[in-house]
Image (cartoon, rainbow, N blue to C red):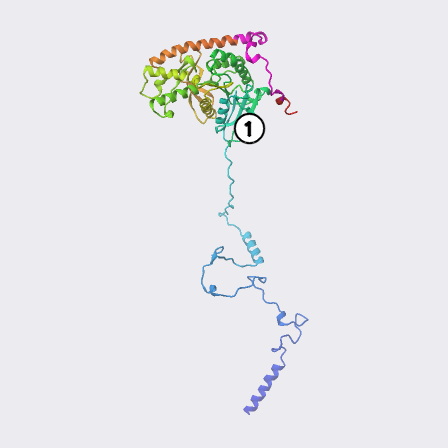
Amino acid sequence: MFTSNLISKSKYLFGSLINRHDNYFRCYAKFKDDNRDCRRAIVDIPAKKDEVCPGPCERRKKKKGILHKIKLKIIEGGTNFGTPFRELRCEETQKEGKKKAAAQIVPEGQKALPAPVREPLPLPAPRPGVQVSVLGAETTVGQYTSLLLKQCPCIKKLRLYEAHCPLPNCDRDLCQVVEDLQHINTNCHIQAFSCTCCDLERCLQNTDLVLIMDGGCSTDSYEKRFSDQAATVKRYADVIANECPKAFVIVAATPIDCMVPLMAKALSDMGWYSPRRLLGSLAVPEMRASTLAARALCLDPSYCKVPCVGGTEGGALVPLFSKAVEYFDFTWHNAEMLTETVRTSSAAVTRADGECVRAAELSEAHALAGLVSKVANALICTDIPHVTGYCQMNPGQVICSSRFLANLVEINGSGITRNFGLPKLSDTEVTLMNVAMNELCYKERLVCEWYNKYCSSSCRLEASQLHFFTPKHYDRFDDCAYANM
């Protein structure tokens, strides 16, 4: 009985399994799907969509090696044994992450800092500089001075004017000198102007500092030098009053004792004279006196300074050797010998080289360039130097028969601001100063006589004896006039 029941139940079980709709042995559906009208293989059924990475990753996964068994701290952007490590994500996931980050709302009270912006480097401020015009730069001293001024950082523009045609065997052509100086790697622009092209007005336009150089022979008497150079300096004064009336003028044309009063008189007639902006150069005799005193005392010349008062040359020049070193004074004999050496040093170094007359070009150029550099620094307010110069005296300080006198002055951006007057002199220096005053008075009378004769002459005919009024033939005029045609 039990056996029959077991057999019947087994038949029923196998029969029910055979009659089921689902087929467990085939790889396709036996009957139609409820939703779709076609039969599909299991391989055609798409896989479930991954929530982390919706699309299939094209990058092939590497097989797990021994490095996967090492526990490493993952740092984004770091390196793993020299290999850059990045988290691999699909493009869609990266776009969704960017959208979520952009959609985040910053709560009130917390503001996101702006992205850092690199500030551009500021441009350096323009360096202040002055424009210097050198009149009479065709001489050797003028060319050496221009070389030193080209290296001065406080000069932004240097203009050289050729007052006379240079001798072919003595001086170089100024245009060639300027072409040579332009190769010096400094920030100073240099230009050349010539008298044959009537460039004096162009040379002096908007000039801050004017240096008037000497164009004659230093061995001649001061009367002859004055008669040769007076008309040229008078013309310089007229053009300065028209083109740059507020320029600071340094007179280095000899005789300086006569040229400074002449320049002051000419500027006064034009209505542009300022005693604070006219100075005669004593840089050369002061340099020579300081060097002689330092050699006599076996000292460094940079620590020994001998001021010069009175005039600028000859018997009017009085170097104060008593001020060379503090608490020390030369004997009367030594002081007189040094004074005579300083007065005659210009003639001692002058020599004749064929048709050319050579003087102490190098030392004079060094002294003049140093004086111009000090005044230029004072005009741009970078320094307040004390220099020795031949200028107009203050009647309230010194009562003398001479209107102009050489002494120590202070210079700033507006010109000469302080005149220190004469210091305490020794007995020997007082005697020399009395002689110098008489000579300065004579030179001032000479200037007044020449100027009155120049101004009162009808059409300047009486002054035709001067070089300035003698017609000259310039060989370079045609080259200058027709160069641009």
Q: Position of residue 390 (x, y in %)?
A: 44, 16
Q: Position of residue 356 (x, y in %)?
A: 50, 19
Q: Is residue 28 magenta?
A: no
Q: Nearer the viewer, residue 294 or 373?
A: 294
In the rendered image, is residue 204 in sight? no
- Name the image quarter holding residue 457: top right
Q: Nearer the viewer, residue 166 or 186?
A: 166
Q: Position of residue 316 (x, y in %)?
A: 42, 13
In the rendered image, is residue 180 in sight? yes
Q: Is residue 472 magenta?
A: yes
Q: Position of residue 416 (x, y in %)?
A: 45, 19
When the figure is inspected, residue 22 is found, relative to residue 179, above or below; the finding is: below
When the figure is inspected, residue 96 is found, relative to residue 234, above or below; the finding is: below
Q: Residue furthest front?
A: 354
Q: Which residues are magenta?
A: 452-478
Q: Is residue 328 left or right of residue 73?
A: left
**Residue ID for mark 1:** 179
